[in-house]
Amino acid sequence: MQDAPRYTYRQTVAADAVRYGGGSGLGAVLKLLAGNRMFRVTFTLRSCQAANRMSGPLRKPLLAACRLLHRWTQHSAAMDLPWETEVGPGLRILHGWGLVVNANARIGANVTLFHGVTLGQKDDLLPGGRVTHYPSLGDGVWVGPHAVVIGVPIGDECIVAASSVVTKPMPRRTVVAGNPGKAVAEVTIPDIPHPAPVGGPSVVAATSAASPVPG
């Protein structure tokens, strides 16, 4: 799983734009901002995180403005994707209605999420007290409509079928289906529509070659 902070604001925004099939240049980003409510949510999330990493007197007012904008884009898209969520480059959200993600979830690179997906925490009540676990999605994971992942890791390039409820960890390239979710097959070809080149230096080359994205 890629670590989101290793990428710059420009690289993550450009990678997100690639996933929507619009290229990675400034023109493609502006077109998506104007016409795609799902992309707007990821863009404002990236903007909040970029502002939060800043230093100096402008950090707090800029972060406050970005958070307000992110709240508006979430509301208009009818989804809950907190700006604190760690998200790798190349996130694509399809339809988006009803998407709910815990702020402590981790989402890898080139992940695809459909409407109604829930990435939620799991609480275990033990003799020593409550232990909370948060979900994580590896790179190239595809999660179908109304699927639920509760407090467990999902390996790279897995496919989680629609309406599945996953409460156990899943290894790389597993097809998960059912309630409770079970491994039903092996993924031979990962389902990553318009994958962004995020394998190390390639993302730098790809985004630098395109028209510049602010950041």
Image (cartoon, helix red, strand yellow):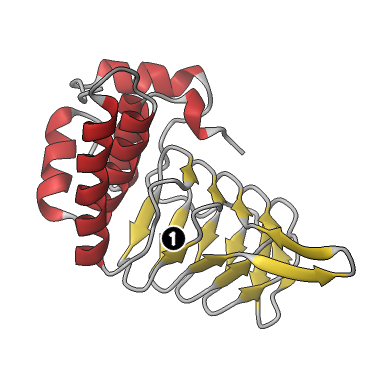
Q: Nearer the viewer, residue 193 or 77?
A: 77
Residue at 47% x, 50% y: name it.
192
Residue at horizontal 44 percent and vertical 60 percent from the top: 113
Residue named by callout 1: 113
**Residue 79 drawn at (x, y percent):** 33, 66
Number of disc labels: 1
The image quadrant of residue 178 is bottom right
Q: Note whether residue 184 is visible.
A: no
- Residue type at mark 1 is Leu
Name the residue nearer the viewer: 199 or 214: 214
Check the picture and name the quadrant holding the C terminus: top left
* For residue 81, side relative to residue 136 (left or right): left
User: Is any part of residue 93 visible from this angle?
Assistant: yes
Q: Which image quadrant is residue 21 in?
A: top left
The quadrant holding residue 122 is bottom right
Percent x, y for residue 101? 47, 61
Please state if 179 lies on the left or on the right of 197 as rendered: right
**Apparent side of residue 93 relative to residue 182 in the rendered image (left or right):** left
